[in-house]
Amino acid sequence: HVSDCSHSNRHRMKVIVSGAGVAGPTVAFFLAQSGHDVVLVERAASFRDGGYIIDFWGHGVEVAKKLGVWEDVQARALTVDELTLVDENNARVGGFPFAAVREAIEFCSLPRGDLARVVFERTCKLPNVKVLFGTSITEIQDATLGQWEAPESAGGAVRVTLSSGEVMEVDLVVGADGLHSNVRRLTFPPVAECTNHAQADKPHFCAQPLMPLGLVVAAATVPSFGVESGTNAYSSYAEPGRSVSWYKYEDGHAVLLFVFVDESLQEVPSELEDKRALLASFFEGVGGGGAEALRCALECDELYVDGVAQTRLSQWHRGRTVLVGDACACPSLLAGEGTSLGMLEGYVLAGEIAELGVQRLDEAIGNYERILIEHTAKQQVSAAGNAGMFAPKTWLGLKLRNWGSRLLGIGFIQRWILGSMLSSDLSLKEYAFAPPSGNPSEEECAQGAVGEELSRAESDSAPSSA
């Protein structure tokens, strides 16, 4: 419960954020900067590192600077000088350098988990953020939707039950729990009540608004990898309908990414042995560096496997529950900037709340959607057209891809394509994140539950303990 000291001041909210990836800690940081008390819950037992390599640029870099973590992100960046497409003999058949990209924009490549850790640790330093690992939301009851009658003494309009059995009363629930969002499932109508299923041109409003793109992705980090790679190169080998990519570190360990075409997969396996069996079946007999990559991946104790899909929603909130990141607008890994979009969404949501104030919370959420839904929809349409670049279905398609990639090494062509990629219809809005005047002072709360709660949060959420 929010203490009387905090609840009596309606400029200050209690917010629960589900998901400690990138978007969740981002929105938690800016809400906390505005003076709100934030509880960040994550179903994993501890922070999850690793993940496949992402390209980080665009609005995400701008938000990272406002978080104060851009220099830390750059310090973790990999030295990737070019994309190299190779054949079965590991000979170069295509690719292009990244020099022109770095000259045009602030850009870096790094494992997604490294970016997530930098943002997470920055957020955990704030005293009004509390982190609960091994915890998920099991029920959401919203008084604004008539799902429960909140007494005047309630700590917020939404009653949330956690997997631990604890019941919290909060002002706002933020679902930042990814493509298969649990918060979305609990809050939005089931598929049977939707007017249409997800289609490329028809975003909709239900619990499972996923548009499969006909691909499956797997990723693994391996301690050693026997294929030689060019210096500072991200390498990729492909056959019709499947591709394997890798980045090899100086110490020999490598990050592997598998992409394959499967338009009939109904359910992604959750058990390690089933993941291994799926990967082995689709890459049986793979040649080139793919054979070594498959051998190494099948020996891993951790293997990420998921369908490549987009989240298409016509509305990102219901009552006092609002979604950010992949939970509401996943563009898929084909977009190249999905993580940046998640950070942008977290920043804009918290910013609109900071600008309009708690008394105009519904209007702030509406503004958040108005600013971003159309922008993210354009990114999704563009990303859906990139499937053939990741896993061409025919040998002819592969040859055309390789030939086209070599054209990107020509300066004026690369600059022309970069210009179209970097053009954006959205300018990042400036917000003032500061606790509103009139909030109770630390001295006033020292005797009450807020001071006690924040003291616990500071010790519980320090980076060392997290």
Image: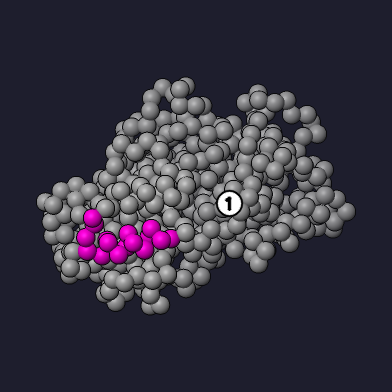
Which of the 4 quarters of the picture holds residue 82? Answer: bottom left
Which residue occupies 78% across, 29% down?
Answer: 151
Colour scheme employed for the rendering of this structure: one colour
Above or below residue 235? Residue 23 is: above
Above or below residue 239? Residue 178 is: above
Classify mark 1: helix, strand or loop.
Answer: loop
- Location of residue 404 in the rendering, given as x and y in whole percent from the top left corner: 15, 58
- Residue placed under numbered mark 1 in the picture: 44
Magenta region's main secondary structure? Answer: helix
Which residue occupies 53% across, 58% down?
Answer: 48
- Location of residue 349 in the rendering, given as x and y in whole percent from the top left corner: 54, 46
Q: Is residue 231 left or right of residue 161?
A: left
Inspect the magenta stretch and tell me whether residue 344 lies in it: no
Residue 407 vs residue 7, the one in the foreground: 407
Q: Amino acid at mark 1?
A: Ala
Which residue occupies 62% across, 40% down?
Answer: 137
Q: Residues within 10 Å of mark 1 (few under 14, many from 20)?
A: some
**In this picture, which residue range is highlighted in magenta?**
285-300
